[in-house]
Image (spheres, rainbow, N blue to C red):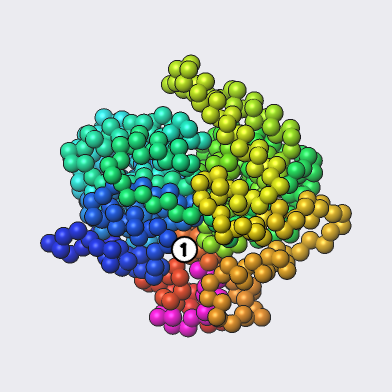
Amino acid sequence: METAGSIQAPAGAGRPTIDDARAVLSQHFGYQAFRPGQERIIQAVLSGRDAFAVMPTGAGKSVCYQIPAALLGGLTIVVSPLISLMADQVRALKEAGIRGSFYNSTLKPRVRPEVLRRALAGWYDIMYVAPERLEDPAFREFAAQANIPLVAIDEAHCVSQWGQDFRPAYCTIAGFVESLPVRPPVMALTATATTRVRSDISRLLALRNPVVEVSGFDRPNLRFANLELMPKQREKWLANYLRAHPGDAGIVYATTRKKVEQITQKLLDLGISATAYHAGMTDAARDEAQRAFAHDDALVLVATTAFGMGIDKSNVRFVINCGLPLSLEEYYQEAGRAGRDGEPADCYLLWSRGDIRTCHFFIDNIEAEGLSGPERQRVIANKERLLGDMIGYAMSTSCLRQRILRYFGQGTSALAEGCGRCSVCDGETADRYLVKERKVTRRIDAMRSSRVRSLREEDDFPEWPDADELFERLRVLRKEIADRQGVPPYVVFSDATLRGMVRRRPKTAEELLEVSGVGQVKLERYGRAFLEELSQ
């Protein structure tokens, strides 16, 4: 039987404290302080309260339930729609020294009873569960016997018909929680929810007087740009952009499967490492595409919206939408997959008027399984309203960051003069990557260089002549280790942590521990290899 690798409160010591949570954060995740909003949510569930967190992608929502799971004992249940990502999430937990498992339709029927048996025997701290499994009689029987100290609901906006990702199975969650012998604290988490959707979430999940944390929606490391381009112009623009960013990982979204395959082939013909992902591919092909992207074997993933909700890959340096998303929530969630490590990243929306007709077609032919005729009409009307807001954003002649923040109900007084970091504020046009015979260079040009310097922490450290070279060497080492471990490279260390090593140049284990993202667990596993590389 596996042994616990997580810190737990001493027997008889009562409920874990926030100081215990900080110890887990340091030892398992390598961070010395919580990000905004995390501590308040963790404190709530440690004290037995329900909690509701609205935090932008990249703000660290998963830590809000992973740390309590390591402290509370028993088995924390995390309800998530991200079936294709659960295995990676469990591997990432293992790398951090926390015991995880998952229960979804990808498990073979003969394996499922063994997973539940091990969970009852105390093998795991946390279990990711697809919402559809909550109605499974075998899982219900298991849950009635298990010690469940916390139920966390990821992507909680899926419970609301007013949101962009309504999933009927989410409507069963409240009943599942109430069926448990002892109702545990419930935590709801989402990245993008308007005021109306937040109200829906709290009511439909039957949260009891929850501690509510709505963190700022702003992502200062992301640069937003909208460019109106015809389809053929998009292809040329995209090719030049990718040539200018060699070695960078990113996502290109297209609106149809056919377009995904066309763009992917075009990129491959240009010698760009790319792979495709859409719902028309076999499960095996999609899994391989996701694996190749996560492991940096394919740097560019071209996909429909079938890919990405909750994607954990931290070193995505750009997200480019070739076509209009159906809502601003959908777009911000997709764009938010860039720069999860806090390093600078680009978010481009390439659109044309013809995309609007395509969006209306998708809405008119929406699938609404399990909904009555009037309910389907309400869903369609809501989708049309959301699309209207998306079109308004695409056509905006005022600061894009301001428009996003206002949409999600956040004040923008600090941006009264504009953000200075979007295509409207800095005047970027499509010509930047369309001008003929443009000399294509690496992305660290004058504009980007100033952004990097202003966004990175620890600027009191000297700038080194060999920083880029050392960073690339550390990336190669990380990839070698990740391949041996069978995990994505970002699970070993994020790009931000590698850059921290480059800036600090640690020479000892104690100095390496001072780099953000290096905890005791990873120091013991990887510290010697990285210190040796740094010493050269």
Query: What secondary structure is the magenta-colored segment mainly?
Result: helix
The extreme left residue here reads: 12
Name the residue located 53 percent from the left edge and 66 percent from the top edge: 496
Camera-nearest residue between 461 and 395 = 395
Residue 326 found in image quarter? top right
Does residue 125 appear in this view? no
Q: Is residue 501 magenta?
A: yes
Query: Magenta residues, as a range?
Result: 497-511
Q: Is residue 486 magenta?
A: no
The spot of residue 383 in percent (x, y) is: 56, 30
Up-down: is 156 above or below 507?
A: above
Does residue 156 appear in this view? yes
Q: Mark 1 points at which residue?
A: 492
Q: How many labels does the image show?
A: 1
Q: Where is the C terminus found, in terms of image quarters?
A: bottom right
Q: Is residue 132 left or right of residue 434?
A: left
The spot of residue 321 in percent (x, y) is: 65, 44
Amino acid of disc 1? Val
Residue 296 found in image quarter? bottom right
Name the residue located 34 percent from the left edge and 57 percent from the top edge: 40
Q: Is residue 97 left or right of residue 419?
A: left
Camera-nearest residue between 507 and 398 = 398
Name the residue located 43 percent from the left edge and 74 percent from the top edge: 527
Secondary structure of the residue carrying numbered label 1: helix
Up-down: is 282 above or below 415?
A: above
Camera-nearest residue between 228 and 253 = 228
The spot of residue 298 in percent (x, y) is: 61, 52
